[in-house]
Amino acid sequence: MADKAPFDEAGRWPLQGLKVLDMGQVYNGPYAGFLMAQAGADVIKIEPLEGEAIRARGSSGEVPLAHVMLNAGKRGIAINLKSDDGKALFLDLVDKADVLLENFAPGAMDRLGIGSDVLLKRNPRLIYGSSTGYGVWGEEKNNLAMDLTIQAYAGIMSTNGPADGPPLKAGLAVVDFLGGVHLYAALMTALYERSVTGKGRVVEVAMQETALTAQATSMTAMHLAGGAQPPRRGNNHPAGTSAPYNVYECTDGHVAIICVRDNHWQALARAMGRPEAATHPDFAESHARATNEARIDEMTEAWTRTLSKYEIARICKEQRVPAAPVRTLPEVAADQPLKTRRAMFDVDHRELGKVTVPGSPLRFHGSPEPEWVVNPLLGEHTGEILEEWLGVSGDIVDGLAAAGIVGVSE
């Protein structure tokens, strides 16, 4: 494959022409909508008149950067769904939509009178996607769900952290984003089926369930322990089957090194100036290294402490040993290769000023070059969307706004 940008300004986006109603909030649902918007869909972010909850999390009244990131490329409309007229407008939008996604608690949409049964009856081609903590049916559906609590309940925290410390959460909102990715996948799967059958359907994702397969290594460790809880192992391999597999101190920070195969270890031993360790019976094969993990770590860190993290990474790259410097977020934000691939953008945001924001990780060869399109202000496109989708004139929109049925940006 040629080592050049695979963009074509004359190309099309995979989801071009698709109409999506995004009722997502915080991270989970909005990330699925973000991926669709970055693939070319017309994603309409629907918010209550006061805005979705995450808008209130910013400091000094400014919009949080997370909201800016996850709603880039969408258009925005604000509707009072607790009013009859607002609900009627919403239903008219649903009639025109291909996809609706939401991540409310189970039953929230039904209580508003706009649940999936109602919407699919009006629009049988609609793909309705729901992401909840524990599913829309089942014994645990009414459990309150946030990323932290699901990390705890799904077992992630039980295996995360140092051996002599308490359980720790993953630093990322990992389950929120796993939920968003799987919701996107479920919606795409259902859209393919609709292209064959012409019929829509409901798809759902339970955040807890997205965390299960992601724990494959920890579940392997449990199996090796005869079904018992595996110990927390810090940065070492969760199942204790690979060494070196750790983060090591350097002169200016830390570096991560892992030797999956024996040839990795042989190359690393030579690079460290310890060629005898490559063939020593205590280290030559993977199971022997795992048994002697502490000695491996001591030997490796004695070497890494003499060099900088980037020097170690360079040496390991030359020797084909998997390794990487532990970079700070400012280092990542300044990374030029990420910007070359349009994975990061430096933008002058209308509310936040100069910020660095990520793009979509999905690359569609033959589509136009990705660009970053600013997130909508609350109700910024209300009039535009109502006129474009429903033929509602500007004067009527002004009246609806004055009556508290829709919101428009100032």
Image (tube, rainbow, N blue to C red):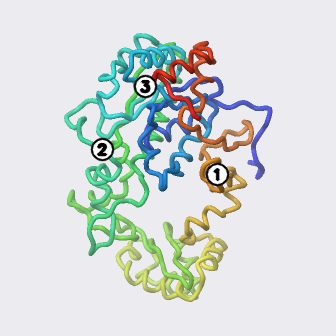
Residue assigned mark 3: 80
Circle 3 Cα neighbour tier, 10 Å, few/some/many (<14 / 14–19 / ≥20): many
Could you tell whether 354 is left or right of 275 in the image? right
- Per the rendering, the mark at residue 196 is none
Viewer-closest of 358 and 282: 358
Image position, residue 392 (x, y; %): 59, 14
Image position, residue 340 (x, y; %): 72, 54
Could you tell whether 141 is left or right of 209 in the image? left
Viewer-closest of 364 and 242: 364
Q: Quadrant of residue 364?
A: top right
Residue at 33% from the left image edge and 53% from the top image edge? 148
Front of the two marks 2 and 3: 3
Residue assigned mark 1: 343
Circle nearer the N terminus (2, 3): 3
Residue at 53% from the left image edge and 24% from the top image edge? 192
Front of the two marks 2 and 1: 2
In the rendered view, tell whether residue 306 sits above or below residue 109: below
Viewer-closest of 391 and 282: 391
Image position, residue 261 (x, y; %): 50, 67
Element under disc 1: loop
Residue assigned mark 2: 145
Q: Quadrant of residue 34?
A: top right
Viewer-closest of 106 and 159: 106
For badge 2, the amino acid type reads Ala
Mark 2–mark 3 distance (CA, rounded to whole Å):
25 Å
Image position, residue 361 (x, y; %): 59, 47
